[in-house]
Amino acid sequence: MLEACFQDLVTWMAGRFGKGVYHAAALYRQVFRQGRLAPEELEQFSLSGDLAKRVKKEIRFRLPELADKVSEDGVTKMVFRLADGVRIESVIIPMATHFTLCVSTQAGCRMGCRFCRTGQMGFVRNLEAGEIVGQVLAAKTWLGYEIRNLVFMGMGEPLDNFDNFVKAVKVLEDQRGLNIAKGRMTVSTAGLVDGIYALAAEGLSPLKLAVSLNAPEDDLRSYLMPLNRRHRLRELIRALQAYPLPPKGHILIEYVLIEGVNDSREHADQLADLVRYLPAKVNLIACNPDPRGSFRPPPAKVLEAFRQTLVENGIFVRVRSSKGRGILAACGQLGRPAATAVC
Ligand code: SF4
């Protein structure tokens, strides 16, 4: 049921029980605000005979099972076991007044980015819309976190699971339920150009778009992110230029800095040239140790020099700290090797 948008529920209640918006709205509110299915407790159901019992019998409502939970520096990684035993991870990140949840959209990922643990575990399966929504509902209603912002930067490439991702966004933003505004959601892509155009066509603005760029020229980017062999940088930048943004909106360019690979002054100049004509803000993130141990973060002074070069080029840039490294909850650290991905 967690994948049902409000209209689906109205249609189902009408077709199955001859009931309408009144009952559907009450049930929808209870499920998505309290995280439980208990129609027998709803006043709206009390005068309708055994309706509550019949509804309960027919609706499948299941939050993902919390298999593990670890915390460090206020960051909490939740490991969920889905109905078929597949494990996925979500990360709760504390902000000054609320929490941001980093949500997974796939178990594993087929993009194969070299610096990413999820990429190295391979693809297991797409998450259903209800499994995407379930991570948010579990963090909010079961664990009591005040989740205000969502970043779809967990396991998987969201635009590679397009239909389920879009369906989940529509459920998450519904004011009768979880009520998380689209402007508080950020979807991060490795650069699936078709997906960016499709997202633009969905009219989901002001949903925010982040792009994991990580290299300013094609050869290096293709080495780090095999997807670049399919969609070259020029094609990607064109898609970003066409993405509809709200007034004063921007695209977030994520750049993971890897010592001796993409952290030189020349790389910074090339990056500035690439993003100069985009309404973009650049986030620099020192890489986390990769599964094979071949990538390392640059020394602090190299990172600072890179940042300074971008600033001198007139680019808006900030350095993002990577919390939760010790519990493998930071960027690029989610997931297990393929052999243990499925229980
Ligand atoms: S960085 Fe994102 S797109 Fe690339 S492998 Fe990891 S999860 Fe997939």
Image (cartoon, rainbow, N blue to C red):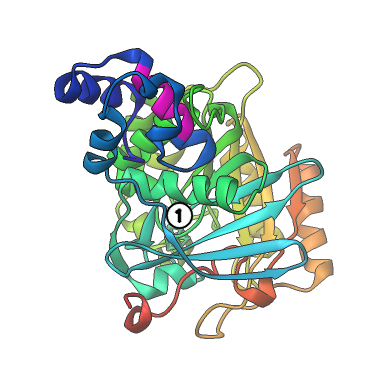
Q: Residue at x 16, y 25 (%)?
A: 16
* x 51%, y 51%: residue: 138
Where residue 303 sits in the image (x, y, percent)? 77, 63
Residue assigned mark 1: 104
| Percent of width and height locating residue 283 | 68, 49
Image quadrant assignment for residue 93: bottom right
Q: How many labels sit on residues?
A: 1
The one of 153 and 233 positioned closer to us in this rendering: 153
The answer as to whether callout 1 falls within 8 Å of ligand 1 is no
| Dominant SS type (magenta) | helix
Which residue type does callout 1 highlight?
Ser
Neighbourhood count class around disc 1 (C-alpha, 10 Å): few under 14, some 14–19, many 20 upward: many
Of 176 and 287, the residue lying toward us: 176
Helix, strand or loop for disc 1? loop
Residue at 34%, 28% (x, y): give it.
5
Q: Does the magenta stretch include residue 100?
A: no
Q: Residue furthest left?
A: 15
Of residues 171 and 333, the one drawn nearer to the viewer in this rendering: 171
Q: In which quarter of the image is residue 86?
A: bottom left
User: Which quadrant of the render holds ligand 1?
Assistant: bottom left
Q: What stretch is highlighted in magenta?
A: 23-30
Could you tell me if residue 310 is visible in this image?
no
